[in-house]
Image (cartoon, rainbow, N blue to C red):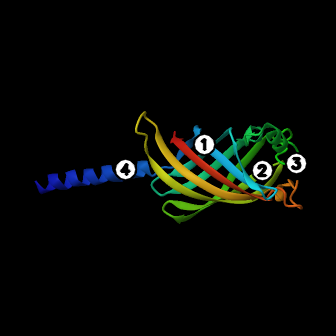
Amino acid sequence: MVDFVVRVVSAAIAFVVAASAANAEPRRWRIDPEHFAIAFEATHIGFSKVLGQFLKAEGHFVFDETTRTLLDAEIRVDARSVFTNHEARDNHLRAADFLDANNHPVITFKMTRAIPKSENSGVVEGLLTFRGKTLPLSVEVTLNKIGRYPWGENYVLGASARTVVKRSLWGSTYAVDNGWVADEIPIQVELEAIRE
């Protein structure tokens, strides 16, 4: 009887260990374009702050849910999709003074390393390619929630990210000297990603 109990307990432990090992494997997550917002703000001649978004973007990352380890990440933004609810201004933003979207239609961010700060937050360091120039950029990231959606079969991760882009470093210097348009542009990212 004792031998039987030992065998059952051993089998149960082996099952739990195997299940944990399986769950610990890093998985690829695809950012859901329907739940992906990239917003920015910029001072306008000191009178107000212009709020805008990029309406088209895609991305993916590799994340281990058990260890909370981010192993890889890439985001691609369509620079031509900039939107501030003002057609003339949006066309100017797409021009060479700002985004230079005709010559460089895609803005990319590729992770180089992730530095955890807590179980649900950290800094993602990477390379931002903007206007054809690539420079390092650090992004503060908060993990909001992981779990099964209340409807459907998707297993989802939600996160928020914040950073500041000093556009003059990438060659966008229009109206920086006279202070009409901010040089440092706060960026806010809200996303949900589906585990593949």
Residue at disc 3, secondary structure: loop
The answer to whether the residues at label 4 and label 1 have Cβ atoms under 8 Å apart is no
Please give the name of the residue rendered at 21% of the width and 52% of the height, measured from the top-left corner: 7
Of marks 1 and 3, the one in the foreground? 3
Residue 21 image position (x, y, % from top left): 41, 52
Q: Amino acid at mark 4?
A: Ala
Distance between mark 4 and mark 3 Cα atoms? 56 Å
Residue at disc 2, secondary structure: strand
Distance between mark 4 and mark 1 Cα atoms? 35 Å
**Nearer-N-terminus badge (1/3):** 1
The answer to whether the residues at label 4 and label 3 have Cβ atoms under 8 Å apart is no
Residue at disc 1, secondary structure: strand
Residue 97 shows which numbered tag?
A: 3
Mark 2: few, some, or many residues within 10 Å (few <14, many ≥20)?
some
**Nearer-N-terminus badge (2/4):** 4
Please give the name of the residue rendered at 50% of the width and 42% of the height, measured from the top-left corner: 195
Residue 36 shows which numbered tag?
A: 1
Q: Amino acid at mark 2?
A: Thr
Q: Residue furthest top?
A: 152
Residue 129 shows which numbered tag?
A: 2
Distance between mark 2 and mark 3 Cα atoms? 16 Å
Q: Judge by depth and name the residue closer to the eye, 55 or 13.
A: 55
Of marks 2 and 3, the one in the foreground? 3
**Nearer-N-terminus badge (2/1):** 1
Look at mark 4 in the image and give the residue it sits on.
18
Q: Judge by depth and name the residue closer to the eye, 71 or 173.
A: 173
Q: Amino acid at mark 3?
A: Asp
**Nearer-N-terminus badge (2/3):** 3
Q: Judge by depth and name the residue closer to the eye, 173 or 18.
A: 173
- Left or right of 77? Residue 101 is right
